[in-house]
Amino acid sequence: LPNAGKSTFLAAVTAAKPKIADYPFTTLHPGLGVVRVGENESFVLADIPGLIEGAHEGAGIGDRFLGHIERCAAIVHLVDGTQDDVASAWRVVRGELSAYGGGLDEKTEVVCLNKIDALTPEEKTKKLKALSRAAGRPARAISAVSGEGVPALLRDLMRIKSGESARSDDETD
């Protein structure tokens, strides 16, 4: 969804300089950046405009760019942890990916509760549990701003790119 922290994440892990603001639809075009993991490993990260409910019927602009991610190895689905209903937010985007087609709903998806730096420990636990339940698998807790959880996420994305399976959060730092 808009304002999930996608551009902030791109800026935090690459040299890209996307426009970042606290209003919806700041990102009007996909942004790309190269993530470097270790000394000799890298992958390209794409930031696409947020999807809103009804995107497959023409609402918003995010669906215009879904074709750009058809070739991606995985989707990092950032969910704004400061929202009241993180499970619903995840479902909206998953529904739009499914309605779009192109196999996007079949891609490896890494679900992340973002903006955990703005949550109390109790809120983080509650929302992470709700998001994991909705996604049917463990969601990761990250903060693109503070960097919490980001190094382990990037290592797992590198593993996915390399054809390995990602490890669970309890196996990484």
Image (cartoon, rainbow, N blue to C red):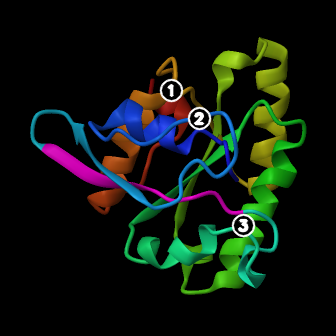
Up-down: is 153 above or below 104?
above
Name the secondary structure under disc 3.
helix
Dot 2: within a 10 Å radius of its alpha carbon, few (fewer than 14), some, or many (20 or more) residues? Answer: few
> What residue is at 45 percent from the left and 62 percent from the top?
74
Extreme residue toward the right, this view: 84
| Residue named by callout 2 | 21
Amino acid type indicated by mark 2:
Ala
Q: Quadrant of the C terminus?
A: top left
| Lower sequence index among marks 3 and 1 | 3
| Residue named by callout 3 | 94
> What residue is at 22 percent from the left and 39 percent from the top?
36
Residue 130 lies, in percent from the top left, at 84, 41
Amino acid type indicated by mark 3:
Arg
Q: CA distance from mark 3 to mark 1?
A: 23 Å
Up-down: is 121 above or below 94?
above
Left or right of 17 in this view: 146: right
Which is more toward the observer, 8 or 42? Answer: 8
Residue 39 lies, in percent from the top left, at 11, 34
| Residue named by callout 1 | 149
Magenta-drawn stretch contains 42:
yes
- Name which quarter of the figure residue 172 lies in: top left
Extreme residue toward the bottom, this view: 102
Q: CA distance from mark 2 to mark 1?
A: 23 Å
Which is more toward the observer, 81 or 54? Answer: 54
| Camera-nearest label, 3 or 1 | 3
Up-down: is 125 above or below 22?
above
Residue range (magenta): 41-51
| Lower sequence index among marks 2 and 1 | 2
| Camera-nearest label, 2 or 3 | 2
Dot 1: within a 10 Å radius of its alpha carbon, few (fewer than 14), some, or many (20 or more) residues? Answer: some
Residue 29 lies, in percent from the top left, at 47, 61
Amino acid type indicated by mark 1:
Gly
